[in-house]
Every structure is written in C-alpha cells, then in structure tokens.
Amino acid sequence: MGDHFAHDPAAASGWAASMRVMLYEAAQSMMRSKKWSWLKAWAMQIARRRGMKKAIVALARRMAVIMHRIWVDGTEFRWTREQAAATA
C-alpha cells in the first residue's frame, strides 16, 4: 500500500488544494469570531497594515505551521501568552 500521494502528483495536488481551502476557511472563521487570542491579534495587525485578504492568507499559513508543530512534537496550542509563560 504505502503513500499513494508520493507516486501520483494529481492526487497530491488535489489533496493540497483541499487543505489550502480548509485552512483559508478556518482563518476566515477565526477573523470573524468574537473570541480573541494572540493569533487573532497578530492577524489583525497585519490586516491594518496590508488588508484583510492578506491577513487571512498569513493567518492560514501560520495555522498550518502551528498544526505541523503539534503533529511533529506534540506541542499544545495556547490561546494566551500568559498560558505560554506559565508552562515555560
């Protein structure tokens, strides 16, 4: 069996496109949400400087990086900077 994406570029690109759409939608949702986090505050700063669309793309990428860290080494997401300082 194995990883069929390694041998089929069309399958891999379809998967990657779906992941990009899901990350963008998640970032859009976070920007509209009333719940605040350091991540949303970071994206709002970008929105003020560069515009909302670029901020959403930047947030989606940052979310992907965070999810990758969680996957690779089991890091937990912290909603606030205080949580991060308390566990460090």
Image (cartoon, helix red, strand yellow):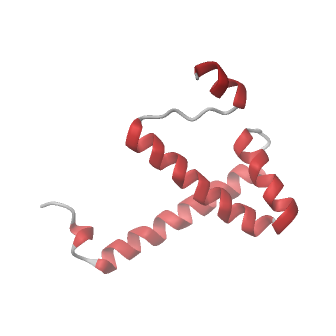
Front residue of 8/34: it is: 8
User: Residue 51: x and y, percent?
Assistant: 82, 67
User: Residue 66: x and y, percent?
Assistant: 54, 46
Placement of the C terminus among the 4 image quadrants: top right
Q: Residue furthest toward the left?
A: 1
User: Residue 13: x and y, percent?
Assistant: 39, 75
Question: Looking at the picture, does residue 51 appear above or below residue 88?
Answer: below
Q: Residue furthest toward the front?
A: 88
Front residue of 19/72: it is: 72
Front residue of 22/39: it is: 39
Placement of the N terminus among the 4 image quadrants: bottom left
Question: Looking at the picture, does residue 76 appear above or below residue 54?
Answer: above
Question: Looking at the picture, does residue 4 appear above or below residue 30?
Answer: below
Q: Residue furthest toward the top?
A: 86
Question: Relative to residue 19, is residue 50 drawn left or right?
Answer: right
Residue at 70% across / 45% down in the picture? 39
Question: Relative to residue 74, is residue 32 drawn left or right?
Answer: right
Q: Residue furthest toward the right?
A: 48
Quarter of the rendering containing residue 87: top right
Question: Looking at the picture, does residue 21 appear above or below residue 31?
Answer: below
Question: Relative to residue 71, is residue 22 drawn left or right?
Answer: right
User: Residue 49: x and y, percent?
Assistant: 86, 63
Quarter of the rendering containing residue 21: bottom right
Residue at 79% across / 65% down in the picture? 52
Quarter of the rendering containing residue 12: bottom left
Disc tally is 0
Residue at 56% across / 59% down in the picture? 23
